[in-house]
Amino acid sequence: MVSIIVGTNRADSKSSALAKIYRDGLLSRNVESQILELKDLPSDFIFSECFGNRTSEYQELLDQYIVSAEKFVFILPEYHGGFPGIAKSFLDSFSGELIKGKYAALVGLSAGRAGNLRGLDAYAGVLGYLQVEVLANRPKLSQIEDLLNGSDLKDEEYIARLNRQMDQLVSI
């Protein structure tokens, strides 16, 4: 099972649309996946679910999307030259033992030109600290506002980049 994590809590985000495209790509490769939208986390999870406090509902969410997953895809938009704080807070809400030794693919997107290059590097560092094996192939999709309309990604090179990464993720 692959869990695709939408790394923003913004409603109707380009990250969410890209996660659905990624899920469809995995499905075409006969790989089961599921999408976790961080916008759907409890609004107070940073205080209510961290540091040993755990509701049964949040534990079920972790069991479904973290414990049961063998691999992860993190879709990370650029926020202020990095990744969204909610993406780090989510990782902070559970023990690193739950994700240790698993594999992750990172996809960056931005309205600007760098496709969240710095954010991907920083997030890869956090995952590396947690002993997650992060794929070196990290597609960076820039000017996403112009190229992604709903479920239609209009750039053949970006589609090829995502397909190469999906093939790598499936093969491990």
Image (tube, rainbow, N blue to C red):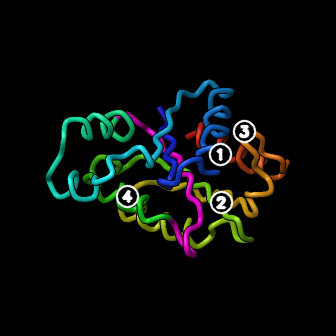
Q: Is residue 151 above or below residue 117?
A: above
- Dot in front, 3 or 2: 3
> Of label 3 and label 4, which has the lower sequence position?
4
First in sequence: mark 4 vs mark 2: 2
Against 115, is 132 above or below?
above
Q: Nearer the viewer, mark 4 or mark 1?
A: 1
Tell me the crowding category of disc 4: few under 14, some 14 to 19, or many 20 or more residues within 10 angstroms, Cα based: some
**Mark 3 Cα shell of 10 Å, populated few (<14), some (14-19), many (≥20):** some
Q: x and y percent of residue 92 in the render? A: 30, 59
The first of marks 3 and 1 along the sequence is 1
Identified by mark 4, the residue type is: Gln
What SS does tag 3 mark? loop
Mark identifier at residue 18: 1
Q: Please give the residue where the numbered disc 4 appears in the rendered image.
A: 131
The three-letter code of the residue at mark 2 reads: Leu
Left or right side of 96 for 163: right
Determine the residue positioned at 74% across, 57% down.
145
Residue at the disc numbered 3 = 151
Q: Residue 115's mark?
A: none
At label 1, the amino acid type is Leu
Work out how far the residue at label 3 is from the one at label 1, CA to CA, in angstroms: 7 Å
Report how far apart the C-alphas of labels 2 and 1 lie in the structure: 9 Å
Q: Are marks 2 and 1 in contact (CB under 8 Å)?
A: yes
Residue at horizontal 20 percent and vertical 53 percent from the top: 48
The residue lying toward the viewer, choosing from 51 and 170, is 51
Mark 3: which amino acid?
Ser
Looking at the rendered structure, the secondary structure element under dot 4 is loop
Above/below status of 163 relative to 43: above
Q: Which residue occupies 59% across, 37% down? A: 170
Of 22 and 56, nearer the camera is 56
Which segment did they paint magenta?
68-83
- Residue under pointer 2: 109
